[in-house]
Image: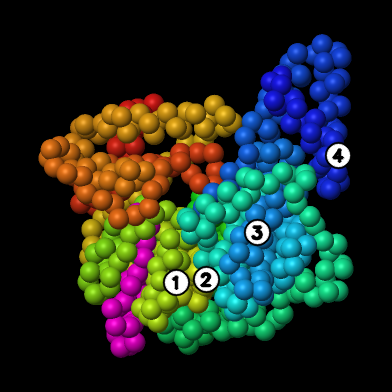
Amino acid sequence: MNKAITEKFELWLKNASGDADLLKELKKIDKAWKEANKNNDREAAGKIESDLEDRFYCELEFGTGGLRGIIGAGTNRINHYIVARATQGLADFVKTRASGNASVAIAFDSRHKSSYFAKVASRVLAANNIKCHVYKDIMPTPMLSFAVRKLKCSAGIVITASHNPSPYNGYKVYGSDGCQLNLSDTEVIVNRINKLDLFNDVVLADFDEAYDKGLITSIDNDVVSDYFDNVKKQAIHRNICGGSGLKVVYTPLNGAGLKPVCRILKETGITDVTIVKEQENPDGSFPTCPYPNPEFKEALKLGLDLAKREGADLLLATDPDCDRVGVAVRNRMGDYELFSGNEVGALLLEYICRERRELDNMPLNPVAVKTIVTTAIAKKIAKKYGVQLFDVLTGFKFIGEIAGNLEKHGEQERFIFGFEESIGYLPGSYVRDKDAVCAVMLICEMAAFYRREGKTLIDARRRMYEDYGYYYHDTQNIQFAGQAGVSQMKSIMDKLRRSCPKQVNGVEVVGFSDYSEMIIKDLKNPKSTPKKTGLPKSNVIKLDLADGSVIIIRPSGTEPKLKVYYTCIGETSEKSAKLQKQIMSDFSALIGI
């Protein structure tokens, strides 16, 4: 085995005694490795060495959203020591920014060790004389964003891996504005973290002593109630759901959504709600749904089966930290059609714009925000209703920043909606992250509104495409693993930058945008000066085709995979879908995936 890997493993064996689960795991690996070598079992030894290499070949990267990785021992895993060191780096940062009364809010979801990691973080902060406000029970991520601002905290932490598979957990950091950390602050914190030794430079307070001293406190119910009051203020037609007869099946996918989603549905008049029993209670193993991502039909199988039995109008599913919501709608044949994030977001945008104009309560110079990989149909909707639409980099933090900047100028009411294709939505600036609780409320309200007109959301979607064009979007997720996978992803991106395809599916590539260089090239006029993207650097490449199709490729910031986003426009939905499949097939062959 590589000597450096061996030394790191032995260092952890010697020092990682702060978490009994972690030490047990390390000793089990050590025993198996020694037995394999003793028995000259090269196959078993090779598997253990490969596992250790993956655990220790690099440090788990603290990106723009924080940390996310497989739970376990090692520098390339999320565990007691990685969380503690990250929190120490955050504490050092907070102390330089706060004027004597630093505080941090903490929330956690249903994943394995989430409550434990929240406790570790609070102990580190308390040891640094920073007050911690911790939710008593699992809570959605947007409620952390709300608490940061409500309690006037210096920062916030939420322990979650969102929709990642069950072996994962994560650690997201928020600034005092309730938004995920901006790029410059992230860089400062990462530099501080990298200077800290995992085992020698972090101190943890005794939890009970810190609680008795008031350095660790529980977030009270007033904050929770205030959050729900703010959610309900985002309704357009506040009394339309009551008596609508809307029938809903809901699954929290064993995550944090059960109580808050059921509460908002009840308080807004949706009373016919059936819960998917197998996915009702919090469970970090996600036993019926190992990959709890409500974007994908596979995750919704139990919900779809129950919806069909119940004859529900809608199936709603929230991910484990309840910031994203998937939607399926019953059609006239009794089957269910899964709506994409692009479709739900565009429908909500149009509903909000049209009805606020109709009610004469649209703010002056309204603003909506979407990410660069999100549907271009939003541009046509925004233009129709006189809304200024911003395009930002992938990641809801950039949408939250727009809302925050408006608030700094006393113009927060201008922000009417933000959304991303990965089923994240935010109507209003009461929080600074996507909010599935509020999205559930508005989706049901929108469905009740169209129901009153004798229409379903499927009818509304059809009309939207007839009005603005038949846009078809799909995302290709290419999985990679380990150190070799990281190199392969980099090789693909480098190849595209060196040699942009001249054609895809026989259609000329007319535009090339490299967001890492912040430039847009007009390939029809190769001698022209490249334009600026106007956005921060990001490892993203965009190809514009002569027929209006768009291909965007980027490495995921949360999982070991490449994401390729396709947008195609056709004369009908069927034709645009067929074109997308042709383009995806040809582009995949061009880049060798």
Instruction: Reply above or below: 312 against 117.
Output: below
Tell me the CA gap for discs 2 and 3: 18 Å
Instruction: Decide: few, some or many residues near mark 4? Use Cα within 10 Å; few <14, some 14-19, many ≥20.
Output: some
Tell me the CA gap for discs 4 and 3: 31 Å
Q: Which residue is mark 1?
A: 404
Instruction: Decide: few, some or many residues near mark 2? Use Cα within 10 Å; few <14, some 14-19, many ≥20.
Output: many
Q: Nearer the viewer, mark 1 or mark 3?
A: 3
Nearer-N-terminus badge (1/2): 2
Amino acid carrying mark 2 in the image: Asp
Which residue sits at x=85%, y=21%?
A: 34
Which image quadrant: the C terminus?
Answer: top left
Q: Which residue is mark 2?
A: 177
Nearer-N-terminus badge (1/3): 3
- Marks 3 and 1: in contact by CB < 8 Å? no
Q: Secondary structure at mark 2?
A: loop
Q: Nearer the viewer, mark 4 or mark 3?
A: 3
Q: Nearer the viewer, residue 287 or 476?
A: 476
Q: Which residues are magenta?
A: 348-372
- Marks 2 and 4: in contact by CB < 8 Å? no
